[in-house]
Amino acid sequence: MQRESLNEAIKAVANACPYYKLLGMEVVEMGEGSSRLRMPFDEKLIQPAGVVHGGAVGSLADSAVAVALLSMLEPGTDIATVEMKINFLAPVRSGVLFADAKVAWRGTRLALGEVDVTDENGGPVAKSLMTYMVMPRQEQGEGGGSKRESTDGSD
């Protein structure tokens, strides 16, 4: 399967994800190591002060890095967030948020992603840096779980 077809399949699966639907997130674009997601303001996303909860903004940023990273990997490779740092720069009370992510570095088992979250006018909302674990799938082990190589943190 060609990379473009794989990316379209990833995009379709992501956009059908119940969590993405819950938050209103949508993968708009994805390319080799990059992605753009959108999330419209919704009353269900606000916290008591009347602005979008930081967890929703963080979920958007995290998801953008995940999609960007998946665009570079072989089918069947699993990923997991191991660390996330986010700076919130402005509150959001309306409009649409966009998360533009790129994979800044990728090793054998770890990857680093950067995300800019902006409002619909391009104004900064948040800046995030994330580390992901990359785990190629192995054959099935006893009990149905997949066997994985041990992670020694060497990269």
Image (spheres, grey):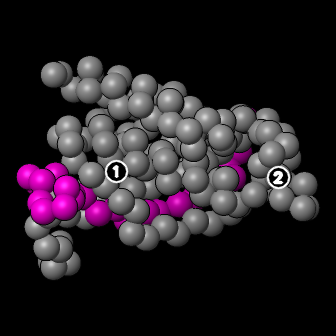
The residue singled out by tag 2 in the image is: 46
Which residue is at a point 22% across and 48% down the rendered structure image? 77
Disc count in the image?
2
The residue singled out by tag 1 in the image is: 103
Which residue is at a point 19% across and 61% down the rendered structure image? 143
Which residue is at a point 20% across and 42% down the rendered structure image? 76
In the picture, the disc for residue 78 is none
**Residue 136, can we see it?**
no
Please identify the quarter of the rendering in which residue 114 is found: bottom left
Specify the quadrant that holds the N terminus. Answer: top left
User: Which amino acid, by three-letter code, is at mark 2?
Assistant: Ile
**Residue 119, can we see it?**
yes
The residue tagged with tag 1: helix, strand or loop? strand
Task: Describe residue 11's horizontal placement relative to residue 19 as left or right.
Answer: left
Residue located farthest toward the front when viewing the structure as drawn = 143
Rendered location of residue 100, percent (x, y): 51, 42
- As for residue 133 lying within the magenta part, the answer is yes
Task: Describe residue 5's horizontal placement relative to residue 47 as left or right.
Answer: left
The residue tagged with tag 2: helix, strand or loop? loop
Viewer-proximal residue among 28 and 82: 82
The residues colored magenta run 121-145
Which residue is at a point 67% across and 53% down the rendered structure image? 56
Residue depth check, mark 2 versus mark 1: number of the one nearer the observer? 2
User: Which amino acid, by three-letter code, is at mark 1?
Assistant: Val
Rendered location of residue 16, percent (x, y): 50, 30
Please identify the quarter of the rendering in which residue 39 is found: top right
Rendered location of residue 109, percent (x, y): 20, 63
Neighbour class for label 2 at 10 Å: few (<14), some, many (≥20)? some
- Measured along the vertical axis of the image, is residue 68 above or below residue 28? below
Please identify the quarter of the rendering in which residue 147 is found: bottom left
- As for residue 153 lying within the magenta part, the answer is no
Neighbour class for label 1 at 10 Å: few (<14), some, many (≥20)? many
